[in-house]
Image (cartoon, rainbow, N blue to C red):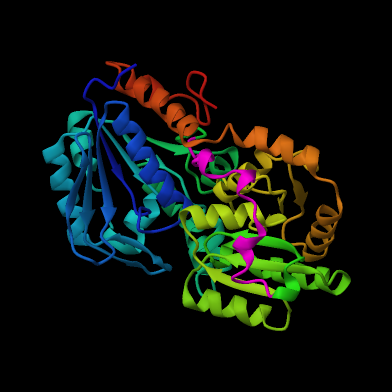
Amino acid sequence: MTASLKTLAFLVTAFPPEVSGSAHFNWARAQWFAEQGYRVIVFAPDWQNGTETAPVSENLIIERYPSQPWIPYKLTYVPTVQAARAISQQIERYQPDLIVMTDVERYFLLSAWQLPGRRYARDNQVPYLAEYHTDVYNFSSTYPGWQWLRSVVRQLKLLSHLYHQLDATICPSKAASQSCQEMGIKNTHIIPFFGTDISTYNPERRNRKWLEPWLTPQAQDHKTIVFLGRLGFEKRVDLLIEAFAQLKRRRSNCSLLIVGDGPADVVASLKKVAEPVADIHFTGFLMGETKANVLASCDLFCSPSPYETFGLTVVEAMASGVPVVTVRSGAVAEYLIDQKNAYLVTPNDTVELGDRLELALNRDNTALIQQALQDASHYSVEHGCQNLHEYYQQLLRPNSADQVLVSTPNSLPSRVG
């Protein structure tokens, strides 16, 4: 079904040149919908490099808004108060048929203190949706000095009041929806929209030469464990370092690559924890082909974070033919089965994590890898965008939006999910 010149406006904070999974998805999603015949307008931060409007194609325009670092996590850029007002004016000019805001708390709290385009949406009966990408509610408790944020949100039901200014909140998983419910956000729909470019990740990329920049000649035959992602306190890489240290005492021929970057204080803290342990290497961010090659060339992937709303890097590892060791928590527990397509452990248990890393290194993982490859194929960008497309189509049909928006919380429209 074609979009029939419908205009979609996406208000995002995560977008290239940011390298997070959400940023890559927001960019891929914009391109996908433009290719389907929608007119797509993306409002994205300028990273303080000046504002510009960049028409990517006939159907895709990137509007860069003046931005500033978000106080709780300064590698994320959010709109200024003046930018939010300008976005509202631009929305009036573009006259979208549907507006989607990702990570509402970043747009509002400690940033613009506004919901751009809300008045236009109300005046013109245009669906105004939230997408819940990041579990800010839970991971704020891992940041020194920000634990109060979770308590204030819970006591005042602050995010509940905020999110209910939007017509519906789209969650990519049951875990994300549950976090919303805990905050008092009731108008949720579970739609598995996240996905990655599965074609980029492939076991055939495996070649130990890609690890040579970090592994010493003496470590070339080491079993190599990799973490890949943003280095934030919520990712709990400190637990992985502790578990690796335990493993290292029992099995010396292993190395750990920590691929990614983050706030300077977080990285410094992790390097301090890792300093006494041999064969731990911080690579910084790796992008594109290099990232895919390094991932496929490792022996295990480990993500110890209990707060994933989906887990894009987990799927990328599965698609690369690399066994996954992660926690039995968050969204990943919805598509991973212990010792079938991954290895699962109890959150925050470094002893169990170290034991499971050793088990995974000692096992023949052929069957597990084959199952993981098959399962990863269901989490492509195309699958996720198709799920959103079906939902948007219901909202854009005449006289159908109200019925869809007020349906039972957590309902899955049509075959979505």
In the rendered image, residue 192 lying in the magenta stretch gets the answer no
Query: Looking at the figure, which quarter contains the C terminus?
Result: top right
* Quadrant of the image occupied by residue 356: bottom right
Q: Is residue 128 left or right of residue 327?
A: left
Q: Is residue 239 left or right of residue 29?
A: right
Magenta region, residue range: 193-216
Q: Position of residue 172 (x, y in %)?
A: 51, 39
* Quadrant of the image occupied by residue 369: top right
The one nearer the camera, 37 or 344, is 37
The answer to whether residue 341 shows anywhere in this view is: yes
Q: Position of residue 258 (x, y in %)?
A: 61, 67
Question: Residue at left 40%, top 51%?
Answer: 23
Above or below — where is 214 with respect to 66? below
Query: Looking at the figure, which quarter contains the N terminus?
Result: top left
Q: Position of residue 347 (x, y in %)?
A: 72, 57
Q: Is residue 217 left or right of residue 247?
A: left
Q: Position of residue 78 (x, y in %)?
A: 31, 60
Question: Residue at left 25%, top 67%?
Answer: 48
Above or below — where is 346 with respect to 240? above
Question: Residue at left 70%, top 70%?
Answer: 241
In the rendered image, residue 209 lying in the magenta stretch gets the answer yes
* Quadrant of the image occupied by residue 81: bottom left
Q: How many marks?
A: 0
The one nearer the camera, 51 or 79, is 51
Question: Residue at left 18%, top 38%?
Answer: 120
The one nearer the camera, 260 or 388, is 260
The answer to whether residue 402 shows anywhere in this view is: no
